[in-house]
Amino acid sequence: MVFEKTPGWLDWYQGPSRPRFVLPAGSVDAHCHVFGPGERFPYAPERKYTPCDASREQLFALRDHLGFARNVIVQATCHGADNRALVDALEHSGGRARGVATVRRDVSDEQLRALDAAGVRGVRFNFVRRLVDFTPRDELMDIAARIAPLGWHVVIYFEAVDLPELWDFFSSLPTTVVVDHMGRPDVSKPVDGPEFELFLRFMREHDNVWSKVSCPERLSVSGPPALHGQQAAYRDVVPFARRIVETFPDRVLWGTDWPHPNLKNHMPDDGLLVDFIPHIAPTEALQRKLLVDNPMRLYWPEELGREHGTHTPQGGRDGA
Ligand code: 0GY
């Protein structure tokens, strides 16, 4: 099936630079997507946008170019709850990708087992209104209860202004909870202001909550250096991401967000995004936690046990 992209759609950047920052060995890009190709894996009828294709081969080429060892592929809303493109990518990754799926309440145990066998380790609940229709909370809670025994976690995507209303629901989730893109703070507000403080409090009061410190290109008002001639790309996002990394170093993840859906004013150079990492995780110890230890604990706990001959620490599917 041939799909027409949403008007004004920005395609992912074809010639990313090689990052100057050398990633620690075994680094994980813990937030990225595959789109189609639409001819093989049609976009969902209920989607809110139609992207350009972004195949698993292209994702794995980017992984190698940037110096990552592994990917966590997150089901994008343009595929709805049809996880075939995701599963296909996982099955062709040679064990180097895990997944976060979208499922509906009527998913069968057999389907959940098949997703688990393919490498899915979580489900995503999306509360961003421009991306999805409303799903009742009791349906989401049913899904969370179904996936918890598998040792999976819940990824949540929401806007900062909606956190007060969603707080109680998030607090009642029975699994590890991973927040996409720091709960989308408004970075034109002060990092010490009440809105971001609420998010920090959310993490402080819930030790099962993790955050992806990803998407500076999506959150930034100052933008990339090419746009405004500034020194550090996306510098207005740095204090927010760095605050989370330094406060909760064992509960943070990082990802490219390739192929960067729904960006409106520029498409980032993924090499530059990698060069952003040392600004938000300034020491080698923080970088190793962010890029290797934390994602491995959540997505490949069995590998950690194998490497170190130890028990799986908390957070992974065998964790406490
Ligand atoms: C992201 C962000 C976006 C889109 C999706 O699943 C999606 O469609 O996540 C967005 O538009 O902000 O994390 O990819």
Image (cartoon, helix red, strand yellow):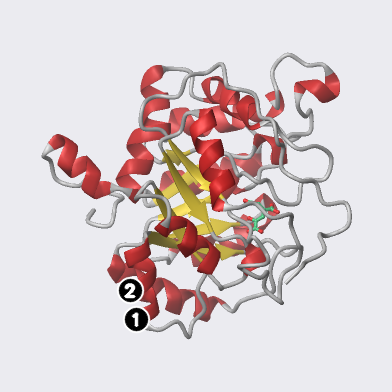
Which residue, given by chain and number where applicable, does mark 2 sit on?
Answer: 113
Q: Which residue is mark 1?
A: 110
- C-beta proximity under 8 Å, tags 1 and 2: yes
- Against 112, residue 218 (above or below) is above
Q: Is residue 255 visible?
A: no
Residue drawn at point x = 63 percent, y = 39 percent:
215
Residue 303 in the image, given as x and y percentages of width and height = 23, 44
User: Residue 292 vs residue 140: left or right?
Assistant: left
Q: Amino acid at mark 2?
A: Arg
Q: Is residue 154 left or right of residue 80?
A: left
Describe the element under mark 2 as helix, strand or loop. Answer: helix
Q: Image quadrant for the N terminus?
A: bottom right
Q: Residue 304 versus residue 4: which sits nearer the camera?
A: 4
Mark 2 residue's CB less than 8 Å from ligand 1: no
Asked whether 56 or 69 is in front, the reply is: 56
Q: Quadrant of ligand 1?
A: bottom right
Residue 279, percent from left and from top: 56, 20
Tell me the residue at 53%/46% (across/down). Answer: 31
Residue type at tag 1: Glu
Q: Which mark is residue 206?
A: none
Q: Residue at x 80, y 46 (%)?
A: 10
User: Where is residue 257 shown, x and y percent of the image?
Assistant: 60, 44
